[in-house]
Image (cartoon, rainbow, N blue to C red):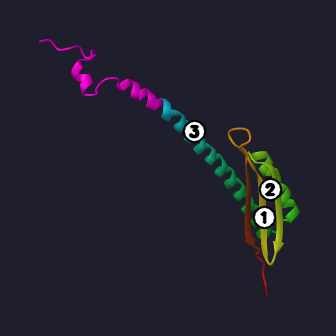
Amino acid sequence: MTRPAAHERTEGDAARGRGDRGAATSLAVALLTPMFVFLAFAAFQAALWSHARTEARVIARDTAALVARSGVPAGDAQESAAAILEADTDLRNVVVSVGSTGGVVTVTVTGDAPGILRGTTNALSVTSAVPIEEITP
């Protein structure tokens, strides 16, 4: 009795369900690939938005510290922060506001973080507050 070649199907293989596995694998790949691509884009998009928020938070904190601890005028710090965010980050429509009430300097940065696709921008707003350091008798 001769054995069939590895690529030949026999009646026993069909009865045991060993045939046409390639079609099932191809179908699974065809159905799952778009989902994995979508998830990869979504993860990359979330990372971009998170990075933009971190950049805005760092500038807000540094600006508040400059005004509260170094005595930099609020207007100068506000202009400098807006210029840095416009020039060095991906944020668009940046608005920086600096306020001081009750011994606390508050800096709010608002802007739009771009997305991968057109129309997927994310509005963000970050506020940082730092107490004013001064010598009190």
In the image, what residue type sits under mark 3? Answer: Phe
- In whole angstroms, how far apart are the C-alphas of marks 1 and 3? 36 Å
- In whole angstroms, how far apart are the C-alphas of marks 1 and 2? 10 Å
Q: Name the residue under label 3.
A: 38
Which residue is found at the position 46% from the left and 31% from the top?
29
Q: Mark 1 points at which residue?
A: 107
Residue situated in front as seen by the camera: 102 or 3: 3
Whether the magenta-drawn stretch holds residue 43 is answered as: no
Q: Which of marks 1 and 3 is in front?
A: 3
Q: Position of residue 20 (x, y in %)?
A: 35, 23
Seen as rendered, the residue at the extreme right is 75
Q: Where is residue 110 in the image (x, y as percent from the top left)?
A: 78, 56
Residue bounds of the magenta highlight: 1-29
SS at mark 2 in the image? helix
Q: Is residue 17 above or below residue 50?
A: above
Which residue is found at the position 73% from the left and 65% from the top?
128
Q: Nearer the viewer, mark 1 or mark 2?
A: 1
1 and 2 marks in contact (CB < 8 Å): yes
In the image, what residue type sits under mark 1? Answer: Val
Tell me which numbered mark, 1 or 2, is placed earlier along the sequence: 2
Instruction: Describe residue 130's horizontal placement relative to residue 96 as left or right.
Output: left
Q: Mark 2 points at which residue?
A: 81
**Circle 1: is it few (<14), some (14-19), or many (20+) Cα within 10 Å?**
many
In the image, what residue type sits under mark 2? Answer: Ala
Which residue is found at the position 58% from the left and 45% from the top?
43
Which residue is found at the position 23% from the left and 19% from the top?
11
How many numbered discs, if any?
3
